[in-house]
Image (tube, coloured by chain):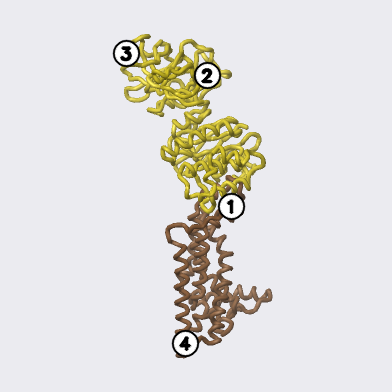
C-alpha cells in the first residue's frame, strides 16, 4: 500500500490548510469566546446559536452558500477580486474561509467554556491589584484557560483535516491546489484504487486517535495538570 | 482621608441605599445578617459593581462623583480587596501572587519583607496556591492586597470560610494590622465576636440600609441592635489591669464603675484591656449586698427599658453620677433606627446624663417586681466578663 507522490501532496495540503485555519480561528475566535463567556447582553443567545450553526448544518449547505458568496458573482467574491485577489472559489484561500467557518464551533465552544470556568473572581482580584483590562486578560485569564486553548486548537485542527463536503463544494477537486486527503480518498474509491484508499484511510484513523488521546489527557481529566510557573 | 460612600444599587428583590462616612484610620466594621448588602457595599466601594449610582470619595479623590463625571475603574482606585474565599491566582505560586501585586503597586508603601514578616508567609513562598490551608490562603491573600500599597483595605468576611483553628490563627494578625497600617480598613462580617475584637467604628447594615453607625462602644450600647443580636448583645468597656490574684486565679481590673474581677489574664498591671459584658450575664437587684457568688456588683441607674420579645426586656443602665455628656435618642423608646449624635453637637438634650454603660436582659416579671423604670437605682451584678487586649 504505497502512498503515491500525489497523495503526499494531498497530505501536505491538508496539514497546511488545518494549520492556517487553526491559527486564524484562535486569533479571531478568542475575542468572540471571551465576549460570549462574559457578556450579559440579550444578544448572547443569538450569537451562540450562530457560532454553533456549522455543527448542525449539513456541510453541503455551508458549502453551497459559500460557493454563492465567494464566487465571482457573489458579494464577498466581488469585493475580494475587486481589491486584486484571485478567484476565491476553487482556491486555497477559499478553502481557508470555508474551513474556518466550518470549524468555528470547535474553537469558540472550548474557549468559551474555559473562560467561563475561570470566572469573574480572579479577574476582579487582578483589577483590585492594579491590572488594566488587557493585562488581566493576558496575565490571568489566558493562563487559567490554557486547557481550553489546547482543546480548541487540537479539535479545530483535527476537524479541518476531516472536512469533506465543504471542501469539495468550495474547493472543487483540483490536485495540488484543493485536493485534500478526504477528497483524495473519495477519488481513489471512485477509481476503484482500494489500496491507495486504505493507505490514506488508515493514516487518518491513526491521526484521529492520537488527537483524541491528546485532548482527553488535558480536558475532562478532573484535576488540573501540574504546571507551576515561578516567575 | 475619610471614605465617603453614598451608594444606591437596585437589583431584583434588593436595594442597597446607604450614605456613609468612614473614619480615616482604624478598622471600620460593616456588620449585618446575610443578605443585608455588606458584600455589595464593599464591591461598590471597590468599583466592582457596574450599576451603582451615587458618590464615592476617598479623601480628596473622587471615584464616582454625581452624574456627569467619569467613574474611576477598579484598577485605578488603589483598593486592596481581600475576598471571602481568598482568591489567589491558581497558576502562580505564593511568591508569584505577591510579585503580581508588587509589579503593579502604587509607589511607596510598606516594604515587601515587612509584609511577608507581619503575616508570616515566608515559609509558604514557594508553595502553589492550592497547596495551602484555609488560614494560610487568607494570610497570603492579605499579604498580596498589602503588597499593592492600597489606599484603603477592604476585607469581605475573611474569616467566615475558615474553621475555628484557622480563625484563631489569623485573628492576632488582623489585630496587629490595625496598628500597622496607615490606611483605613473596612471589615465586613456577620460575626459580632470578630467585630468586638477588631473594630473601632461600626456600621450596622440591614436589608440594604444603615440602621446605625458610630464608634464600637456606642453602637453596642444601643438596645435596638442588642435586641437583634440576641445572645451576643452586650457592651464593650475599657479597663486597666490593676493586680493579679494568683492564689484564686483572678485578675483585678480598674473599670469605669469600680473594680472588676475576671479570670486570670496575662496582661501586665497597667496595661489596657477591652471588657466585653454580655447582657445575659448581667442581673439586677435592689439590695446592695446580698451574699452571692457573683463578685462584680456596681451601683447604676436605669436609663431606659426596651421591650425585646415575649417576656423579655433590655435595660440600659448608666453608671452612678452623670458626667455631663448628652445622649440624644432620636427615635425614642422603640430601639430601632437610631443614630448617635456627637455630644458636642447635641440639640435639646434635657438632662446631662452619662451615656448608657451597661445592658442587662431581664424578664418582664422581674421588671414589674423590681419596678424598673428610668431613674431607678439598682445594683448590677455581672456574672462573667470576657477580656481582649486593647
- Give neighbour class at mark 1: few <14, some 14-19, many 20+ (Cα, 10 Å): some
Q: Secondary structure at mark 3?
A: helix
Q: Which residue reaches farthest right?
A: A84
How much space separates mark 2 and mark 3, taking CA atoms?
Answer: 41 Å
Depth order, front residue of A164/A158: A158
- Residue in the picture at 60% in, 38% down: B114
Q: Secondary structure at mark 2?
A: loop
How much space separates mark 1 and mark 3, taking CA atoms?
Answer: 68 Å
Q: Quadrant of the N terminus of chain B?
A: top right
B64 above or below B127?
A: above
The subunit letter for the residue under badge 1 reads A
How much space separates mark 1 and mark 2, taking CA atoms?
Answer: 52 Å
How much space separates mark 1 and mark 4, taking CA atoms?
Answer: 53 Å
Res. A1 mark: 4
- Give neighbour class at mark 3: few <14, some 14-19, many 20+ (Cα, 10 Å): few
- Residue in the picture at 48% in, 50% down: B130
> Disc 2 vs disc 3: which is toward the camera?
2
Task: Write down the residue under mark 2.
Answer: B270
Depth order, front residue of A202/B240: B240
- Where does residue A42 sit, x and y in percent of width and height? 50, 55
> Disc 1 vs disc 2: which is toward the camera?
2
- Horizontally, residue B57 falls left or right of residue B352, namely right
- Residue in the picture at 51% in, 52% down: B90
Q: Earlier in the sequence, mark 1 or mark 4?
A: 4
Depth order, front residue of A115/B159: B159
Res. A136 mark: 1
Q: Which chain gets the yellow colouring? A: B
Is residue A61 something one can see in this rendering? yes
Res. B369 mark: 3
- Give neighbour class at mark 2: few <14, some 14-19, many 20+ (Cα, 10 Å): few
Amino acid at each position: 500500500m504505497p502512498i503515491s507522490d500525489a497523495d503526499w501532496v494531498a497530505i501536505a495540503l491538508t496539514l497546511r490548510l488545518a494549520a492556517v485555519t487553526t491559527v486564524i480561528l484562535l486569533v479571531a475566535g478568542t475575542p468572540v469566546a471571551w465576549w460570549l463567556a462574559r457578556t450579559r447582553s440579550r444578544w448572547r443567545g443569538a450569537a451562540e446559536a450562530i457560532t454553533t450553526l456549522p455543527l448542525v448544518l449539513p456541510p453541503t449547505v455551508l458549502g453551497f452558500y459559500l460557493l454563492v458568496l465567494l464566487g465571482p458573482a457573489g458579494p464577498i467574491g466581488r469585493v475580494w477580486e475587486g481589491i486584486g485577489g484571485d478567484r476565491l472559489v476553487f482556491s486555497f484561500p477559499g478553502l481557508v474561509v470555508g474551513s474556518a467557518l466550518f470549524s468555528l464551533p470547535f474553537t469558540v465552544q472550548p474557549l468559551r467554556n474555559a473562560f467561563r470556568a475561570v470566572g469573574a473572581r480572579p479577574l476582579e482580584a487582578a483589577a483590585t491589584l492594579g491590572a488594566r483590562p488587557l493585562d488581566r486578560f493576558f496575565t490571568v485569564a489566558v493562563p487559567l484557560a490554557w486547557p481550553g486553548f489546547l482543546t480548541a486548537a487540537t479539535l479545530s485542527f483535527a476537524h479541518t483535516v476531516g472536512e469533506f463536503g465543504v471542501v469539495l463544494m468550495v474547493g472543487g477537486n483540483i490536485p495540488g491546489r484543493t485536493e485534500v486527503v478526504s477528497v483524495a480518498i473519495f477519488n481513489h474509491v471512485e477509481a476503484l484504487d482500494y489500496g491507495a484508499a486504505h493507505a490514506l484511510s488508515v493514516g487518518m484513523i491513526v491521526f484521529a486517535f492520537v488527537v483524541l488521546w491528546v485532548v482527553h489527557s488535558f480536558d475532562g481529566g478532573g484535576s488540573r495538570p501540574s504546571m507551576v510557573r515561578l516567575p | 482621608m475619610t471614605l465617603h460612600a453614598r451608594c444606591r444599587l437596585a437589583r431584583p428583590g434588593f436595594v442597597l441605599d446607604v450614605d456613609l462616612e468612614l473614619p480615616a484610620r482604624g478598622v471600620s466594621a460593616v456588620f449585618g445578617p446575610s443578605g443585608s448588602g455588606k458584600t455589595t457595599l464593599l464591591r461598590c466601594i471597590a468599583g466592582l459593581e457596574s450599576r451603582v449610582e451615587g458618590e464615592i470619595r476617598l479623601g480628596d479623590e473622587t471615584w464616582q462623583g454625581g452624574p456627569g463625571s467619569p467613574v474611576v475603574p477598579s484598577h485605578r482606585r488603589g483598593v486592596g480587596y481581600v475576598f471571602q474565599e481568598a482568591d489567589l491566582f491558581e497558576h502562580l505560586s505564593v511568591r508569584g501572587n505577591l510579585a503580581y501585586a508588587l509589579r503593579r503597586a502604587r509607589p511607596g508603601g510598606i516594604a515587601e519583607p515587612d509584609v511577608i514578616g507581619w503575616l508570616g508567609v515566608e515559609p509558604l513562598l514557594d508553595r502553589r496556591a492550592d497547596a495551602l490551608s484555609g488560614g494560610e490562603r487568607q494570610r497570603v491573600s492579605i499579604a498580596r492586597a498589602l503588597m499593592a500599597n492600597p489606599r484603603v483595605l477592604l476585607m469581605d468576611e475573611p474569616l467566615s470560610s475558615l474553621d475555628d483553628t484557622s480563625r484563631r490563627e489569623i485573628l492576632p494578625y488582623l489585630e496587629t494590622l490595625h496598628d500597622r497600617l496607615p490606611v483605613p480598613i473596612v471589615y465586613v462580617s456577620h460575626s459580632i465576636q470578630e467585630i468586638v475584637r477588631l473594630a473601632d467604628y461600626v456600621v450596622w447594615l440591614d436589608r440594604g440600609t444603615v440602621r446605625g453607625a458610630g464608634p464600637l462602644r456606642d453602637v453596642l450600647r444601643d438596645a435596638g441592635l442588642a435586641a437583634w443580636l440576641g445572645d451576643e448583645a452586650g457592651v464593650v468597656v475599657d479597663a486597666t489591669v490593676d493586680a493579679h490574684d494568683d492564689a484564686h486565679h483572678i485578675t483585678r481590673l480598674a473599670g469605669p464603675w469600680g473594680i472588676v474581677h475576671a479570670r486570670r489574664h496575662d496582661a501586665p498591671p497597667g496595661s489596657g484591656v477591652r471588657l466585653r459584658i454580655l447582657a445575659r450575664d448581667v442581673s439586677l437587684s435592689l439590695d446592695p449586698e446580698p451574699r452571692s457568688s457573683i463578685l462584680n456588683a456596681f451601683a447604676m441607674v436605669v436609663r431606659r427599658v426596651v421591650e425585646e420579645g415575649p417576656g423579655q426586656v433590655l435595660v440600659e443602665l448608666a453608671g452612678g453620677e452623670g458626667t455631663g455628656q448628652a445622649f440624644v435618642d432620636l427615635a425614642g423608646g422603640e430601639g430601632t433606627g437610631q443614630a448617635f449624635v456627637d455630644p458636642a453637637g447635641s440639640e435639646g438634650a434635657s438632662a446631662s446624663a452619662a451615656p448608657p454603660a451597661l445592658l442587662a436582659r431581664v424578664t418582664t416579671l422581674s421588671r414589674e417586681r423590681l419596678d424598673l423604670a428610668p431613674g431607678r437605682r439598682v445594683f448590677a451584678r455581672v456574672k462573667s466578663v470576657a477580656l481582649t487586649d486593647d
